[in-house]
Amino acid sequence: MIKTSIEAIIFDWAGTTVDFGSRAPMGAFVNLFKSEGIAMTIAQARIPMGTNKWDHINALLHLPEIQSQWLRIHGRSHVNADVDRLLGVFIPMNMVSIKECSQLIPGVAELAKALRDRDIKIGSTTGYTKELLDLLLPLAKEQGYEVDALSYAGDTPLGRPAAQMMHKCAEQLGFDNPLSFIKIDDTQPGIDEGKAFGCWTVGVAVSGNALGLSYEELSALPQEEATKLKEISRNAMQAMRPDYVIDSVADLLPVIDRINRRLDLGEKPNS
């Protein structure tokens, strides 16, 4: 019997490997709708996080509080052409915010080196488009993080929570056993993407969308308040039913060891 062990980790980007608090997309979405005369909060902008950007904009336009403003301004419901137009406006806005929020989350560069030392491959799936990813990849590489495989919004017919981007990464890496993969993400669609693929899933609770604060903002909070917010975020991530919940990817290595021990026992992920 051939022993199975973790061969690849498929990471998300904003909130998982870069951009502590997943702030880059949020500011761009708020500014996008502001340019249309529509008031939107950061909390509203976060609701569809993890989906590709076209679907994200479409989902925001379906929120009752956003839809009512759109109807008042345009006198009709939005159509796909409106989403296409808004996406075209959004991409340049997000490019600016990506440059401003491209710093690696603490521990990512060290984790990447540790994975290389273990001969574990690194892949990525993302709701970012190719234009946005083309901007982000070299910025991450300069800081010590590089991927071996990737798939992005528009690269496959279906985005998250479907598993098509995961399958694309698996094909690029030459691995075909989902049990040897871990999908790590900070959103429900990203976790569901891993489940649909049949691999192990790990949710990051503190560095990403669930908490939504920058590293500096979180560090500046009184300890009691920060502890309370972290616990709320952990509970929110646990509700997404990943196999494991960690604060950030800096905590991932012990989880890999635990999963490998479970694989030795013939266990399988929640999915």
Image: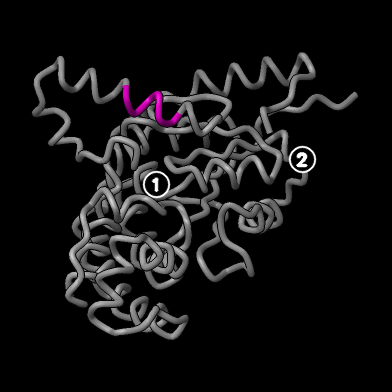
The residue beneath circle 1 is 145
Q: Is residue 54 above or below residue 188?
A: below
Q: Position of residue 221 (x, y in %)?
A: 10, 26
**Label 1 to label 2: alpha-carbon separation:** 25 Å
> Is 187 part of what is drawn in magenta?
no
Q: Nearer the viewer, residue 25 or 255?
A: 25
Mark nearer the N terminus (1 vs 2): 1
- Residue 66, disc: none
Q: Nearer the viewer, residue 46 or 71?
A: 71
Stretch in magenta: 232-237
Residue appearing at x 32%, y 31% in the figure? 206
Amino acid on which disc 2 is placed:
Asn
Residue appearing at x 46%, y 47% in the figure? 12
Total tally of numbered discs in the picture: 2
Q: Residues within 10 Å of mark 1 (few under 14, many from 20)?
A: many
Q: Secondary structure at mark 1?
A: loop
Q: Main secondary structure of the magenta part?
A: helix
Image position of 220 (left or right of 48)? left
The residue beneath circle 2 is 177
Q: Quadrant of residue 53?
A: bottom left
Q: Nearer the viewer, residue 179 or 159?
A: 159
Amino acid on which disc 1 is placed:
Tyr
